[in-house]
Amino acid sequence: MLINHVLDEQELKEYSPIVLAYIGDAAFELIVRTHLIQAGNRRIKEIHKDAVGIVKAESQAKIVRQIYDTLSEQEKDIVRRGRNAKSHPPRNADVQQYKMSTGFEALLGYLYLKGDEQRLLTLASLALEQPEK
């Protein structure tokens, strides 16, 4: 991906789950946009609408619940840390969904900063394969 210096476990433990979620959000957004672009040339308005539908808190909360059993114990711990982190959800967001999506983003951020591109892409692919319910 775009990272040129990966962090080791000790360095990663020093980051708050909110910081991990911040970079995880950006990594997931880039993966989603790339996925949508690779599906074929379309109007940007349509691509944007589809991207927003995937990366919104409600969708991410659903995704993390659906893939939770596929996660390692360490990954589940990172999701829990992100979910339990003190954050300020937007006024229009469901608090529980926002917390779960923060956990998902924290995990993606952790994997990104760790340089585990394969696992990051695997989880993102699982997320992109989830049917809309």
Image: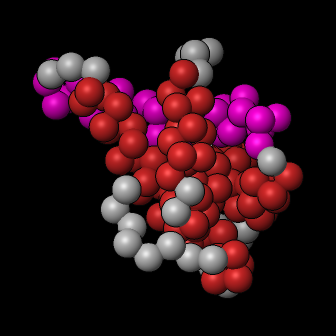
Quadrant assignment, res 26: bottom left
Q: Nearer the viewer, residue 88 or 91?
A: 88
Residue 16 visible to an observer of this rendering: no
Q: Nearer the viewer, residue 67 or 57?
A: 67
**Considering only vertical position in the picture, is 33 above or below 88?**
above
Q: Residue at x 50, y 52 (%)?
A: 117
| Residue 77 % position (x, y) | 82, 59
Q: Residue at x 77, y 35 (%)?
A: 70
| Residue 33 % position (x, y) | 32, 38
Q: Residue at x 73, y 68 (%)?
A: 85
| Residue 84 % position (x, y) | 78, 62
Q: Residue at x 57, y 38 (%)?
A: 122
Tally the numbered discs: 0
Say left or right for 4 vs 83: left
The magenta stretch spans residue 26: no
**Considering only vertical position in the picture, is 76 above or below 39?**
below
Quadrant assignment, res 48: top left
Residue 63 visible to an observer of this rendering: yes
The magenta stretch spans residue 53: yes
The segment highlighted magenta reads: 42-71
